[in-house]
Image (cartoon, helix red, strand yellow):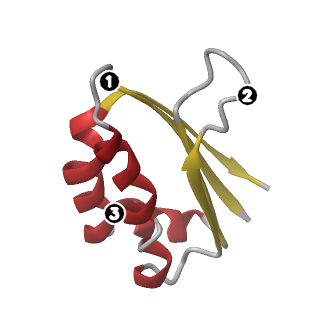
Amino acid sequence: MFRHIVVFRFVEGASAEQVAAVSPALATLPGAIPELRRYAVGADAGLLEGNWHFGVVAEFDDEAGWQRYRDHPDHLRIIAEVIRPILAERAAVQIRS
C-alpha cells in the first residue's frame, strides 16, 4: 500500500464559496482515476486551534498508482482552478506500508 497525505491552509480572505468548492471538486477524482483505492477529503473539524484547514488521504496499491493520480489532468485542473487560488500553505507526505 502507498498512502498520500496532504494538508492545506487557505489564504485569509478566501470566501466561504471558494473553500466549500474544494471537497466536491476533489470528490470527483475517484471516478476518474481508477488507481485510487481509498480517498478521504474534508475540512478540519475545528477541534483544535492552529490545525490546518483541509486534508486529503489517498491510498494506492503502489507508487506508480500515486504518480498517475499526481499527474492526472483532472487532478491538475482542480489544483490549478480550485485550490491554488486560495492556497496559503501545503504540506504532504507519502508513506509506504
Q: Which residue shows up at 51% across the image and 63% down it?
A: 66
- Drawn side of residue 33 relative to residue 84, left or right: right
Contact, CB < 8 Å: mark 1 with mark 2?
Answer: no
Q: In the rendered view, does 79 fall on the left or right side of 96?
A: left
Q: Residues within 10 Å of mark 2 (few under 14, many from 20)?
A: few
Q: Which residue type does callout 1 highlight? A: Val
Q: Nearer the viewer, residue 44 or 7?
A: 44
Instruction: Indicate the secondary structure of the residue bearing disc 2.
Output: loop
Q: Which mark is residue 11?
A: 1
Give the quarter of the image for residue 77.
Answer: bottom left
Upstream in the sequence, badge 1 or badge 2? 1
Q: Are marks 3 and 2 in contact (CB under 8 Å)?
A: no
Q: Position of residue 83 (x, y in %)?
A: 31, 45
**Residue 32 x %, y %:** 40, 82
As shown in the figure, which amino acid type bears the numbered disc 2? Leu
Q: Which mark is residue 40?
A: none
Pointer 3 residue: 75
- Earlier-in-chain disc, 3 versus 2: 2
| Residue at (57, 62) in percent of width and height | 63
Secondary structure under tag 3 reads helix
Give the distance between the C-alpha atoms of the residues marked 1 and 2, in whole angstroms. Answer: 20 Å
Q: Residue at x 37, y 43 (%)?
A: 19
Say which element carries label 1.
loop
* Residue holding disc 2: 47
C-alpha separation, residue under disc 1 versus residue under disc 3: 21 Å
Q: Amino acid at mark 3?
A: His
Task: Please say if 13 is above or below 43.
Answer: above
Pick whichever, 20 or 27, lies toward us. Answer: 20
- Answer few, some or many: residues within 10 Å of disc 3's Cα (few below 14, many 20 plus, some between 14 and 19): some
Q: Residues within 10 Å of mark 1 (few under 14, many from 20)?
A: some
Which numbered mark, 1 or 2, is in the foreground of this view?
Answer: 2
Camera-side residue: 72 or 64? 72
